[in-house]
Amino acid sequence: MGLEGAPQEAISAWSAPGSGENSKVGIVLVHGFTSTPSVMRPWGEFLNGHGFTVRVPLLPGHGTSIADLDNVTWQQWPAEIEIQINHLLIDCEKVFLCGFSMGGAASLHVASRYQSQIAGLILVNPMIHRKNVWPTAVKIASRLVKSFGTAGSDIKRGDVIQWKYDRTPMRGAHQLLRLLEETRPLLPTIKSPLLLLRSATDHTLPASNSEIIVREIGSSMKEQKLLHNSFHVAPLDHDQEIIFTESLRFIRQSIA
């Protein structure tokens, strides 16, 4: 699914102030590579409905054209998350990061530097490596091949849409691999509590991504939940409610 016909509100950044006693808790929800806030907004709206202050950013290079994604550096993605965290910290006492797929890797990279500010990490089918795919090889290939088509959204449900690019730029893919390469060594330094939700059937990322994170992260408090009725884009799939309720439980438990 490309972006043609996408409602502007689905592919734009979204934020909402909190209310009541939970308004001092901020949450940043980060979408994946080639995707848009459309994946994270229902989750963000659920959490905001429980009073939390929520921000769903649009990552640089996304939501416009693949030409823009072809001209970003990997550092711009964590930098955008840092902007969101710092905005929340003006009024919020605690901040949580929720990352999906590549958004999980970018969130982990930020968490390694914001140890005292991050009260917890919630990751859904996060990305941390691509086996037998090397950044240098992709960089060389990008001189010959500008982009390649994608297989579409890996969603079990047939009645939802993930608004995303339908092609992947090679230079953007190289930057994604650089992000993974730079983030994995940081895992042992991350001490924030972790909730990781992984789909039992994921046609996009192998389970080794979640296994590496759970094994190598330095968090003393870490949980892993298996999602049995969703594919890769689980925040929009059949297990959406499980993700919502488990994240709410985890946040409440972490701030108690």
Image (tube, rainbow, N blue to C red):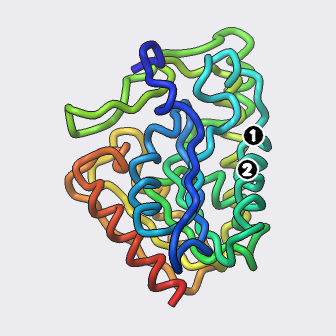
Residue drawn at (71%, 23%), measured in percent from left and top?
171
Label 1 close to label 2 by CB (< 8 Å): yes
Q: Residue type at mark 2: give it.
A: Pro
Residue 15's place in the image compared with 249, above or below, is above
The disc label shown at residue 78, or none: 2
Q: Is residue 98 above or below residue 249?
A: above
x, y (%) of residue 116? 75, 79
Which residue of the protein is positioned furthest toward the front in this rendering?
20
Q: Residue furthest top?
A: 144
Residue that label 1 marks:
74
- Is 181 rendered above or below residue 73? below
Q: Would residue 110 be found to the left or right of residue 33 on screen?
A: right
Say which residue appears at 38% left-offset and 77% top-offset. Answer: 249
Q: Residues within 10 Å of mark 2 (few under 14, many from 20)?
A: many
| Residue 71 image-quadrant placement | top right
Instruction: Answer with left or right where residue 75 lies relative to residue 246.
Output: right
Mark 1 secondary-structure assignment: loop
Classify residue 141 as left or right of residue 48: right
Tell me if residue 134 comes above or below residue 243 in the rendering.
Answer: above
Q: Position of residue 41 (x, y in %)?
A: 45, 46
Query: Which residue lies at the image location 37% right of the left edge and 59% below the top edge?
Result: 198
Q: Nearer the viewer, residue 33 or 15?
A: 15
Residue 51 on image: x %, y %: 47, 69
Q: Residue at x 46, y 64 (%)?
A: 211
Mark 1 surroundings: few (<14), some (14-19) or many (≥20) residues within 10 A = many
In front here: 203 or 133? 203
Q: Position of residue 15 (x, y in %)?
A: 58, 50
